[in-house]
Each structure stands twice: as structure tokens, then as C-alpha cells.
Image: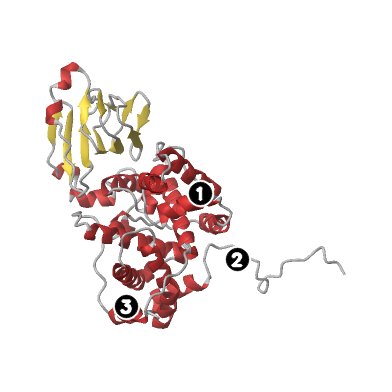
Amino acid sequence: MNEGISLPVSGNNKSWTAPTGRRTDEWSEALVLIGKSQDRAAFTRFFRHFAPLIKAFALSGSNLSANHADELVQEVMLKVWQKAGGFNPEKAAASTWVYTIARNCRTDMFRRLQKFDTPLAAEDFNFELEEEEPFAVLHTRRGSDRIRELMGELPPDQAQILAKVYMEGKSHSEAANELDLPLGTVKSRVRLAIQKLQVHMEKA
Amino acid sequence: MVNHHPTADFLTDYATGAMPPAQAACISGHVNYCEQCRRSIEQLQDIGGALLERLPPAAVSESVLDNVLARLDEPAPLSFDTSKRGLTDTAIPGLLQRLINGDFSELVWRKITGSLSVSYLKTGDEHHEFALYRIAAGGQIPEHDHEGSEMTLVLQGGFSDESGHYGPGDFVYRKPSETHAPTAIQSEECICLAVMDAPLRFTRWQHRWLNPFLQLRAG
Ligand SMILES: [Zn+2]
């Protein structure tokens, strides 16, 4: 018996990844179903998984009451239903897509609560990536998988800072105040974390 | 070809939603021209998605689900179509088009010097002025500094200063008290978007008399 060599068997082998950027995980597929055929069962499954995460996001570090957090969950989930047709599993992971909607709704809710008068909604700042070459799609896909893998390996101080700026929506200087750290330390921790997650940045 | 990009700090604040609207509109304008920064922002948003997946879930009552299910047939609100934005060197970024409500020529331009005029736009951001500056071909903005910071995005034409040449889509950030005297390229008038948190201050005696007229117009 030669145990040292095993050839990948296409079709049945779970670790074999098809050379496309299309995501075939449960939540991407649910979103596609919701978008294509207004599938309420798929939406309900999606809700049961994501609503508690959106609520946790709403409550993390913010001054939102439990009522406002529930209101945010409703707004985000309604947008999920309305916008699912525009979800493209080649371009984004389901959780990233949900994150951007939740972030925008939270920004708008804060502005509403503070009676901040602006002609712009947070989603006006969104942009779409162009239709892309399969290679570029695959590249993007690998980048986003890698970020999820490397996330668990971040040192605690860097993970803490990322949670502050992403989940709590704090600016670098707000994070510095709350953690009682110099602004420069906060900035360099965020930068280090982003480097470790291998996010590519152009030189400014 | 875009050569000057926002720093990682700016792109992160943009991706996490922590950036004030006037500055975010400027970054979004750059991203309109710059595919590399679009990709960086996509990846930065992936960090948000990955963190969201890892949050400890908070219980949501069934009544919230029922409320949402009952509202699914409501018509979706009209939203600004983000998908039409092209990646070109000449088009005005979509978000700006909306704030301008048309073309550069339809704006009210106020003259500051013979070769420099300004048009103020409203973003609702009470800490930042959001304005378009128009410099005549070959014209110079008198040497100035800032009590605050300045983000600049070139929309048309180009300019040069001590630190380089800037063309459409290029992003420049000046910290408080950095002095510069940009000169527009000879061949074409230059239009820039500038986002400031304090008024600019001319530093040479010939132009200092203008300073009292340059109040910050935030909002
Ligand atoms: Zn760029």
C-alpha cells in the first residue's frame, strides 16, 4: 500500500476547490435563492442565522437601546430581502455583504438619532466592483478566505482594536480615548493587523 | 492613471463607516477612479464580515422575525443607483454629480483671485467644508497653509506643487500647517474637490488681505 501519494479525485473530494470565485456556502446560496425567487423559507433561515449577529453588532460598544437594536435588525433584514437580487457570490461573501448593509443602516440610525441633517445616506457611498476576469475573481475570493483564516491568529491587542473600529464603528481617535492609548499606537495596531491579514494597499 | 492614493488609515475609517460624510465623499470620489483602492476597501470590508461571523449572537425575539416577514411585500424604497458609476478619467464621480446636481458649469463660482474661484457644496457635515476649486490653465494658487487638514481630489486637468504632479483621480492630503502653492497645468483648467476642517490662509503679504474673506463654510 502506498499511503504517501493520493491523487485528488474531482467531484467527490471535499478539499478540492473548483477554479472559480463563485461561493457555494450555505448563506451565499440562501441569498441567491432569496434574490432569484423571493424564497421566504430561505429568508427565514438566513434571518435566524444573521439577525442575532446583527443585533450583537448593534449592541457592541454603542449607545443603542435594545429597542433600537431590534429596529436595526428589522431595517437590515428588510434591506437584505430587497437587495438580495444584487448579491453576486463571485464578488462578496454573504457575511461581508450583510456587514456593509448593517454598517450603513447603523450610521444612518446614529445620524437620525442625533438629528444630523445630510442629503446623503450611508449607502450612497457604496460602489460596485466592475465585472471582472475569472482570474481577478478567484484572486479576490482567495483574499477574503485568507482574511477569515488569519483572523484567529491575530495577537489579542490587534484583535481588540479591530473589534473596536469595525464592530463598534469607532474612529481611530475614539478608540484611542476609550482604550486610553496614544493615537499613534492605535493607528499602528490597526495597520499591523491589516498587514497580517494580507490586505493589499497601494502606497499613498 | 492614478498615482496618489489615500493612506491605509483613511481607507480603514472609510470601510468601517467612521469617517465624516464630507471626507467619505472625497474618498468615494477617488475610488471612482481607482481600481486598486476599490479592491483594498473590499478586503477591508471582508474584515468586517469575518468579525461579524465571530460575534457572540444576541437573542432576537420571534416577534422581530414576524414583523419583518409581515413587511416583505412593502415596495422597496428608491435608492440612488450605484451600479452606473463608470471607471473613467473624465466623468464626474456619481456621488459628486448628485451633490452638484448637474455639470461644473451649472455651479455658482465665486472669484478669489484672478485665476482661482470656488464653489461650495452641501454635505451636511458640520465640521468640514466641501468645495470645488477651479484654477485657470497655468494659474497658481497663492502660497497658503491651513490651521486644519485638507483632502484634495483632482477632478479635471492637473496641478503641480513642491511634492509632485497630480492628475484626475489623484488624492492629496495635507496636514495642518503644511504650506504649498499649487500651479495648474498649462493646457487645461484644473478643477479639484477640497475637504477642509479649517479655512485656508494665504501666507504671502500680497494675498493676506484676502484671509478674512475665507471663512470655513462647513455644512
Ligand atoms: Zn487609489
The residue mark sitting in front, 2 or 1, is: 1
| Residue assigned mark 1 | A158
| Residue assigned mark 3 | B68
Q: Share a chain, discs 1 and 3? A: no
**Image spot of residue B169 (x, y percent):** 34, 40
Note whether B45 is above or below B210 in the view shown.
below
The residue mark sitting in front, 3 or 2, is: 3
- Determine the residue positioned at 57% across, 58% down: A149
Location of residue A118 by image quarter: bottom left
Q: Residue furthest right?
A: A1
User: Chain for mark 1?
Assistant: A
Q: Residue type at mark 2: give it.
A: Ala
Q: Residue type at mark 1: give it.
A: Gln
User: Which circle marks residue A18 in the picture?
Assistant: 2
Q: In this view of the protein, which residue sits in the foreground, B86 or A175?
A: A175
User: Chain for mark 2?
Assistant: A
Alpha carbon distance from label 2 to label 1: 33 Å
Element type where label 1 sits in the image: helix
